[in-house]
Image (cartoon, grey):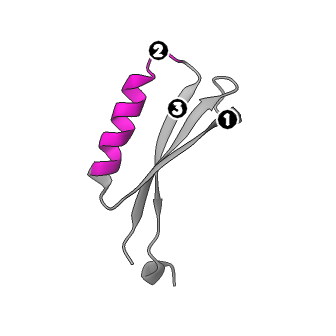
Amino acid sequence: MQDEFWVVGGRYRDTSFTDLADGGAEAYGPFARYDEAHRSWSDRSNGSRSLASVRYSIVVTASRARAA
């Protein structure tokens, strides 16, 4: 199994970015390659640039072969 990349984040309660606001959790993916996830992250981050409490990150899930 290959690594998978996800874009996760959304609207947080404040700019400490510790607690997501109600209904703020979002996840997009999985993407097979980092560059695909990066494009998604970039589109979402640029689209929410004026919203100070919105943040997205790229997360990788380890393949089962590597995790074992």
Between label 2 and label 1, give the one nearer the viewer. Answer: 1
Please tell me how crowded label 3 is: few (under 14), some (14-19), or many (20+) other residues with Cα within 10 Å. some
Q: Is residue 51 left or right of residue 18?
A: left
Does 60 lie within the magenta span? no
What is the secondary structure assignment of the residue under circle 1? Answer: strand
Report the disc number at residue 50. 2
Instruction: Tell me which label, 2 or 1, sits earlier in the chain.
Output: 1
Residue appearing at x 45%, y 53% in the figure: 6
Q: CA distance from mark 3 to mark 2?
A: 11 Å
Could you tell me residue 68's position as x and y percent?
A: 51, 85
What is the secondary structure assignment of the residue under circle 2? Answer: loop
Between label 3 and label 1, give the one nearer the viewer. Answer: 1
Which residue is at the front of the view, 17 or 44? 44
Instruction: Check disc 2 and give the amino acid type.
Output: Ser
Residue appearing at x 27%, y 50% in the figure: 35
Instruction: Tell me which label, 3 or 2, sits earlier in the chain.
Output: 2
Magenta extent: 36-51
Residue appearing at x 41%, y 32% in the figure: 44
Q: Which residue is mark 1?
A: 23
Could you tell me residue 1's position as x and y percent?
A: 39, 78
Q: Which residue is mark 3?
A: 55
